Image: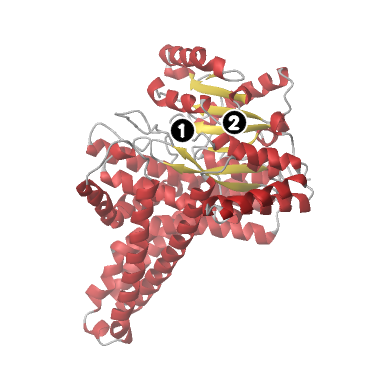
Amino acid sequence: MNRPFVFSHAVRTPQDYFWERFFGILPGFLSWAILIGITLFSFTRPLYAAVVIIAIDIFWLFRIFYMTLFLVLAYAVLAIEKETDWIERCRLLEKGQRALSILRKKRWLVGKRGKIKRWFDFKNQERELREALRRKIRVPSFDSIYHVVLIAAAREGAEVIEPGLEALSCSRFPAQRILPVLAIEERAGAQQLEMAEGLCRKYRRHFFDFLVAVHPDGIPGEARVKGANATCAAKQTARFLEEKKIPFEHVVLSCFDADTIPSANYFAALTYHFMRHPNRTRSSFQPIPVYHNNILEAPAFVRVLETGSSFFQLVEATNPEKLVTFSSHSMSFKALVEIGYWPVDMISDDSAIFWKALIHYGGDYRVVPMYVTLSMDVVTADSVAKTLVSVYRQKKRWAWGVENFPIVMRAFIQEKRISFASKLRYVIKLLEMHISWATLGFLMTLIGWLPAIFAGQEFSNSVVYYNSSRITGLIFNLASTALVITIILSHLLLPKRKTHYPFSKRILLALEWLLVPLVFTFLSCLPALDAQTCLMAGRALEFRISEKKRKKMAPKP
């Protein structure tokens, strides 16, 4: 019988150590091999290198066009579901077959009034209800669902945490069934505990209860990471729920960063998705993170970078088969307890919890996309230079998700319940994502010019050179179309403020997108390559809290 797999970098046998190091080296090796190989080819075989670069450019730009198409579709769904009455959806879901006639009548009425968004909303709801009835899904009662909101804080003050608690208290889901859990670090000191207890006293009356969980410092086997703090708080929450006799299978846990502000619809939408899903206790639920709390106060390069991150998550939501949890997300509390909580020695806890659950359940675990937003802070510091450093460190920490790769590969070698096809699909996803993250920016903005520079006469007499104008025109048209659509959507996604911005300000906000090549290369690709190089060398990344400041109250998402 196989020994149970431990989702950790701490290995038990020499064989485990070999595979850990081999797969830890592989992503960085492939990334560096691509970059160095094409660079050397540009000097020695520039014509061949030019063909490779053009092929990569065409592939990537068609992919951008594909992503832009799905970005528009995802935004359309987000806009439609923003007006959804999720509580009503939950109540109709409970009615089962009787709800179909109600939905048909509602759809007919809104169609007659020309309300297209509402018509599509009811049409989609009717389709989902038919699917639930066809699959004979046992829908739990809306009134039996509880939400635990775990807010992990390190050194963040009340000015960062309180807007999220205020948004929780204004949720359209009944606050009497919401349990905030503020997880703080003992090493943060007595002042942090006093702040947490003050928030508890102020907001407890609004909710089912309010827990403050203190994570002791220096526990053997733990690193100074968010996962260790969240695990400690979740264990205390489990004891609390047991005392209150609340079944874990009726509890949904949302693990939020300290700066997360949920929209008023978030928990109602989450409840609906949880109720209608046939495998709800083996699923995570991923919203769309947007970085809007202080985005208009941030430097231009930060706005472009973080808007791009939101767009990427929107596109990812259109492909549930490949979706992995990211940043703030939600999951069944029952599943969290069964898999043994978050890894306590890993930085990438948000993605690690998905891989840990997938392996624990032998591949029977999925991420359900939700077209509802959570708003968070962008990295800002006292100066542009400090902001640059903080942004770089944050992106390197995000790219450190590559640390999951050697653990997942070791698990796949041992795990027999997951099919080979599923393993191959996940391996390709992990490798393709991290390698393209670390290389594409350099290939398209820097290395891509080398073949033309060094080819000389050989290149000018080639068929590639003859067709290069047509290829360039195609690339330019696709890129321009995608850029225009991206600029429009970036403005539509920005938070609505009472402040009126002059036309010149709006033009400057649009022109910021011309920074994409530089921002993408040096504040996304370079940190990713740095993270993979650290993993290759066996150097552990130190967890650092990103510096975030707000000059004004964060807008409601």
SS for dot 2? loop
Q: Which amino acid does label 2 sit on?
A: Phe
Alpha-carbon neighbours of circle 2 within 10 Å: few (<14), some, or many (≥20)?
A: many
Residue marked by disc 2: 173
**Does residue 369 appear to the left or right of 390 in the view shown?**
right
Q: Name the spot of residue 200 as percent of width and height, x first.
A: 51, 15
Tag 1: Cα neighbours inside 10 Å, few (<14), some, or many (≥20)?
A: many
254 or 232, which is in the foreground?
A: 254
Residue 539 image offset from top left, x and y in percent: 43, 41
Which quadrant of the rendered structure holds the C terminus? top left
C-alpha gap between disc 1 and disc 2: 17 Å
Find out whether the residues at labels 1 and 2 contact each other: C-beta distance under 8 Å.
Answer: no
Question: Is residue 26 shown to the viewer in this render?
Answer: no
Q: Mark 1 points at which residue?
A: 260
How far from the left and from the top, in percent, is residue 69? 46, 62
Q: Check disc 1 and report its element: helix, strand or loop.
A: loop
Q: Which residue lies furthest to the left in this view?
A: 504
Q: Which residue is drawn at 35% across and 28% down?
A: 553
Quadrant (top left, top right, bottom left, bottom right) of the N terminus: top right
- Residue type (three-letter) at the residue carrying disc 1: Thr
Q: Which of pointers 1 and 2 indicates the residue nearer the eye?
A: 2
Judged left or right of residue 460, residue 129 is right
Between 25 and 443, the one lying in front of the other is 443
Identified at 38% across, 23% down, the residue is 159
Which numbered disc covers residue 367? none
Residue 109 x, y percent position in the rendering = 61, 50
Q: Earlier in the sequence, mark 1 or mark 2?
A: 2
Task: Name the side, left or right, on which 223 lies relative to 420.
Answer: left
Quarter holding residue 247? top right
Residue 229 can be seen in this image = yes
Q: How many labels does the image show?
A: 2
